Image (cartoon, grey):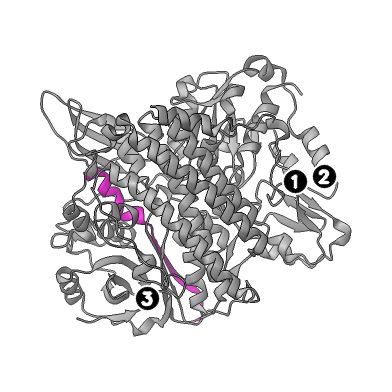
């Protein structure tokens, strides 16, 4: 095993990462039981450098390795055949660098060439296709879904994305900014901005104050509370339980309006910056946050109790869209969806920093279905409310610290990696610099990159009318995937 | 069922009664207020602006490019730039989005959207939109969804989003318009029956925003077709959106 082991948010010298023969790299990836969090290429003179990062969730370590591939190489034997977790990563690598993974079971475009693509087909008397998108019926982002159905039952769902592709990774190299990081995925503003800021800070080994870290963590948990409440409303809206939809919708407004008071934007835009944060939380604001959260918690408790008592709600949620724990593991589902399928991963605790290490992870007994995805949101809202209260008391110990530290210049030939648990799951940002200290490659992995295939598995053998319910339960990002 | 009904009673009425004069928190960053006499022309604000929305000679901000992030306000020690919480930002032509020191909320709003007889005649009491997210980050989409929730409730003014362009009176475009969405957007436009209106919503749609230098955009749609309404904001606040549409379809 030839790895370089790092912790989350650590800068290392780019050349410290071992460069090994491609065949032996593949061999060590095929046999490991650690899950991949990155597998991407970068230009390296005449060659392409392939970086891989594996997450050791139990020890909180990240294992890095790399290999050089000549640009004239046309193909290689696919890793996905032995380890299905590389399924999306290999497709992405093929699309970006044109090196074909031979024998890949399902080599489709990820973000490009959307006009013609192959899809699974079925023939028979009662089979039919339902094609939806890219423009959907609601006010949501574009994507193309193709259902293979027999009667009402879905046999397979083919998901084709890439419509939102805006070339974010290239823009990040050319002109990185906090504003760009915030606009990669507008529902995870704080999570993305935290990941970006931590990555950029580490490139110059800038240390920010504990106070700034606490404010970032408070904002991250507030974002989680707001979006989870909105999602619970959306799930209930899709099964026509409209009281739930409206009550959760109104409760979400309370949280995001508090965010507006902190940062001047309902989603916390402009709050986090490289070097710290732009807005302080004083005693008055802190009291306001606590009193809002008490109201929010009371409403969410009452509403969830009323909703789960209703038999119409329970009959739609229970045993709908089940993904077994084994499948979840095989597909490397992460974040909220992974936890709702019984996987015990949460990068807040797995790769914890000084802020989260004082907190305890609470267990969740997953039932793997739509009910599980509803309930875990409720559990995480409660959990996050208690975390915010804890952070606010911690904040009082650090009142005199500055909220902003001037960031230092980038160190040449650096490699940094930052994992942040957004409300959807782990967001991975990786940056490398060249000899002159400029950013040479920026790589982003959204949790949706892993989880879209999970949605496809969840709807199998369910009625097509249950698709909206499953989709809202997963609530995956199109733009985070498309970049 | 009784629990559900109790919940409804406990929540009472949540809607904002007077949407045109709805209060908003003072921290909200809306229309900027500029003071050229305080400006030292150091150009620092233009450097910190990642959107390229600022120029200092004379001091002006192009709201079509501005993401209202407030970086320039924080940079300027002389307080030449200040963001007010004025939220009625929608206009009917791009030139009106250039903010100089003469602009105050009153004279901005007076000129912002001119009354068009044919629009007020047809859409006065109901206008239905088809929303197209063409590379949007989901921020504007979430705010447009929020415009229909129990707080803002734009449905009571006859403004709604419908599922098909065939049922719509116009389209609302969010996002910088990626290459991959250009065809679908145009298709959607063509499928909407005449007479139709086009509304651009959010900084990305107005100018490409933070993605303006990307190679993956195709903004021909904007040049090709007439745009009726430009609504800035990153993301556009529900109050900004609803008020712009109301000014557009109703006589003042």
Where is A405 relative to B138, above or below? Answer: below
Residue indicated by mark 1: B98
- The answer to whether residue A161 of the structure is visible from this angle is yes
The verdict on residue A444 being magenta is yes
Check disc 1 and report its element: helix, strand or loop.
Answer: strand
The foreground one among A97 and A272 is A272
The chain under label 2 reads: B
Instruction: Give the spatial CA distance, label 3 vs label 2.
Output: 53 Å
| Residue B237 horizontal/vertical position (percent) | 61, 42
Frontmost residue, A402 versus A293? A293
Please tell me which residue is depicted at 69% across the width and 65% down the height of the picture: B47
Tell me if I can see residue A185 in this picture: no
**In which quadrant is the N terminus of chain A drawn?**
bottom left
Secondary structure beneath dot 2 equals loop
Q: Quadrant of the C terminus of chain A?
A: bottom left
Please tell me which residue is depicted at 37% across the width and 32% down the height of the picture. Answer: A238
User: Marks 1 and 3, how far apart in space?
Assistant: 45 Å
Residue, disc 2: B103
Location of residue B110 in the rendering, given as x and y in whole percent from the top left corner: 80, 33
């Amino acid at each position: 095993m030839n790895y370089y082991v790092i912790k989350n948010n650590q800068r290392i010298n780019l050349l410290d990462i071992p460069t090994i023969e491609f065949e032996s790299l593949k061999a060590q990836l095929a046999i490991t039981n650690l899950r991949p969090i990155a597998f991407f290429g970068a230009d390296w003179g005449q060659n392409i450098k392939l970086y891989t990062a594996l997450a050791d969730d139990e020890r909180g370590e990240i294992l890095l390795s790399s290999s050089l591939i000549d640009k004239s190489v046309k193909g290689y034997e696919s890793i996905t055949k032995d380890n299905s977790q590389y399924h999306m990563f290999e497709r992405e690598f093929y699309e970006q660098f044109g090196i074909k993974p031979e024998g890949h079971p399902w080599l489709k475009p990820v973000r490009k060439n959307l006009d013609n693509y192959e899809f699974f087909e079925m023939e028979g008397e009662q089979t039919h296709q339902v094609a939806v998108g890219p423009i959907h019926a609601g006010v949501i982002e574009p994507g193309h879904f193709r259902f293979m159905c027999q009667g009402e039952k879905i046999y397979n769902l083919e998901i084709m994305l890439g419509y939102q592709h805006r070339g974010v990774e290239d823009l990040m190299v050319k002109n990185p900014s906090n504003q760009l990081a915030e606009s990669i995925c507008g529902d995870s503003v704080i999570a993305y901005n935290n990941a970006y800021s931590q990555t950029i800070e580490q490139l110059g080994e800038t240390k920010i104050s504990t106070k700034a870290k606490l404010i970032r963590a408070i904002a991250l948990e507030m974002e989680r509370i707001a979006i989870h409440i909105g999602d619970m409303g959306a799930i209930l809206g899709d099964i026509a339980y409209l009281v739930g939809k409206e009550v959760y919708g109104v409760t979400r407004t309370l949280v995001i309006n508090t965010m507006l008071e902190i940062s001047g934007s309902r989603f916390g835009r402009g709050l986090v910056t490289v070097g710290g944060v732009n807005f302080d939380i004083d005693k008055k604001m802190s009291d306001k946050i606590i009193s809002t959260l008490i109201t929010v918690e009371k409403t969410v408790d009452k509403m969830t109790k009323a909703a789960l008592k209703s038999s119409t709600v329970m009959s739609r949620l229970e045993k709908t869209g089940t993904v077994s724990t084994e499948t979840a593991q095989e597909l490397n589902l992460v974040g909220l969806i992974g936890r709702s399928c019984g996987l015990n991963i949460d990068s807040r605790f797995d790769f914890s920093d000084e802020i989260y290490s004082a907190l305890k992870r609470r267990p969740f007994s997953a039932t793997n279905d739509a009910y599980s995805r509803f309930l875990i949101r409720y559990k995480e809202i409660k959990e996050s409310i208690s975390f915010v209260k804890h952070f606010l008391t911690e904040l009082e110990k650090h009142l005199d610290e500055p909220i902003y530290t001037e960031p230092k210049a980038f160190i040449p030939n650096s490699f940094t990696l930052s994992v942040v648990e957004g409300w959807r799951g782990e967001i991975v940002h990786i940056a490398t610099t060249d000899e002159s200290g400029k950013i040479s490659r920026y790589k982003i992995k959204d949790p949706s990159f892993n989880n879209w295939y999970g949605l496809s598995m969840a709807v199998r053998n369910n009625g097509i009318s249950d698709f909206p319910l499953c989709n809202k339960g997963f609530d995956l990002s199109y733009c985070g995937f498309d970049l | 069922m009784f629990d559900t009904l109790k919940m409804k009673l406990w929540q009472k009425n949540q809607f904002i009664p007077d949407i045109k004069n709805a209060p908003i928190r003072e921290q909200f960053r809306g229309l900027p207020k500029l003071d050229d006499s305080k400006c030292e022309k150091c150009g620092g604000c233009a450097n910190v602006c990642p959107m390229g929305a600022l120029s200092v000679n004379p001091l002006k901000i192009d709201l079509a490019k501005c993401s209202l992030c407030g970086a320039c306000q924080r940079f300027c020690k002389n307080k030449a730039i200040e963001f007010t919480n004025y939220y009625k930002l929608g206009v009917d032509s791009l030139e009106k989005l250039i903010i100089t020191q003469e602009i105050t909320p009153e004279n901005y709003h007076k000129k912002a959207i001119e009354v068009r007889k044919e629009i007020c005649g047809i859409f006065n009491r109901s206008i239905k939109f088809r929303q197209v997210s063409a590379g949007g980050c989901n921020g504007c989409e979430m705010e447009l969804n929020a415009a229909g929730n129990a707080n803002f409730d734009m449905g009571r003014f006859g403004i709604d989003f419908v599922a098909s362009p065939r049922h719509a009176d116009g389209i609302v475009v969010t996002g910088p318009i990626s290459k991959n969405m250009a065809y679908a957007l145009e298709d959607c436009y063509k499928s909407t029956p005449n007479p139709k209106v086009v509304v651009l919503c959010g900084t990305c749609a107005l100018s490409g925003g933070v993605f303006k230098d990307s190679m993956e955009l195709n903004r021909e749609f904007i040049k090709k077709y007439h745009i009726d309404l430009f609504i800035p904001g990153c993301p556009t606040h529900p109050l900004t959106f609803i008020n712009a549409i109301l000014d557009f379809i109703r006589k003042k």
